[in-house]
Amino acid sequence: MSTASERQARRVQRYYRWLDGISFYRERRAAGEAVHPVHRALADPTGGPPSPLVIHRLMLEGLALPEAPRVLDAGCGYGATMLDLAPRLGGDWTGLTLSPEQAARGNAALAVAGLSARVRVQVQSYDAPPAGPFDLIYGIESLIHSADPRATLAGLAQRLAPGGHLLVVDDMPEPNLPPEPAQRLAQFKQDWRCPVAPDRDGWIAALRDAGLELVGERDLNPLLQVRGMAEVAPRLAEVRRRSWLSRSLGFGVRAEAEIGGLLLESLQTEGWVHYRLLAARKPA
């Protein structure tokens, strides 16, 4: 009998297989962006344009990494974060994805960049991570898919070297939401295959239970490029109207992903969900 983690991994794998074939990334691939980051564009606090690459700089602020770090990207998508950071930081990098399509495209881009000798994307669950040890493990908008975040963080923490860091960058709902935003949150979680989606305190408790010390956090909501419910409502109604048949038949993955994203936007704008960065360290 399969575990909850294994069943969830299959759901997420199917979800990204559909999205890879028919959805948002087609236009980016056509423009030559084969491994465009699949995470949020943030305003640059230093004054640059909004970009999905901003989080890469923010998440490394204040971290003391060794000269050639061993790094694990727990839920790497197409490997764009590694493609951006590995040339600058050096070291050895491993990215994990459940999608063979993402792994193939990511490894092809790494080969073109001349990074294959020390950077790779593997089809593997972050609930069964490589042995390591790693100096840095991070999950950007990936660990929210975990069926058991406490168990996931415990397993990742075991793979950290003494003094190593574990970073969580994800959407964290506020506790005890009123009924209407709680309903929107439930729909978002269903559409984006996020069965638990802990709040801030839940993630911090899980990090501490894993034997890690919280050493930094940042609320990234002020840097998001998001709209409120009044602005997203017309598009939300249109997507729901056009996709009701495909969704009812179980083929509406692209529509579900867009609906979930629109609902998340509104929740973030209204402060019911915060996009946060948490940094934890394993004792030396």
Image (tube, rainbow, N blue to C red):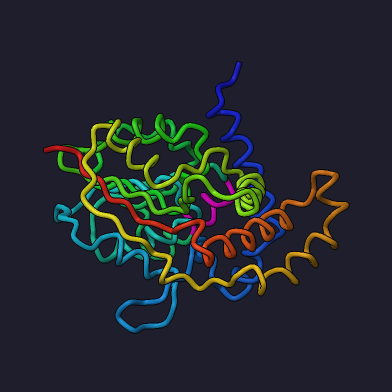
Percent position of residue 222, x then y = 41, 70
Left or right placement of residue 205 versus residue 186 in this view: left
Q: Main secondary structure of the magenta part?
A: helix
Quick one: which residue is furthest to the right in this view?
Answer: 245
Q: Is residue 10 visible?
A: yes
Q: Which sits in the foreground, 74 or 181?
A: 181
Say above or below: 215 vs 209.
Answer: below
Q: Residue furthest front?
A: 178
Q: Measuring 47% from the left and 32% from the top, which residue is drawn there?
A: 148
Position of residue 209 relative to residue 134, above or below, is above
The reply to whether residue 16 is visible in this rendering is no
Q: How many marks?
A: 0
The residue located at (51%, 66%) in the rendering is 36
Give me the residue at 37% from left, 43% from top: 201
Residue 72 is left or right of residue 9, and the answer is left
Q: Position of residue 117 (x, y in %)?
A: 33, 52
Instruction: Please determine whether, in this image, residue 95 is positioned above or below residue 152.
Output: below
Nearer-the-camera pick, 179 or 241: 179
Q: Which quadrant of the figure has residue 194? A: top right
Residue 214 is a magenta residue = no
Q: Residue sitting at 60 percent across and 46 percent down? A: 189
86 vs 272, left or right, is: left
Q: Quadrant of the C terminus?
A: top left
Q: Is residue 71 above or below residue 90?
A: above
**Dividing the picture into quarters, in which one does residue 116 lie?**
bottom left
Which contiguous range is marked in magenta?
Answer: 100-108
Q: Quadrant of the N terminus?
A: top right
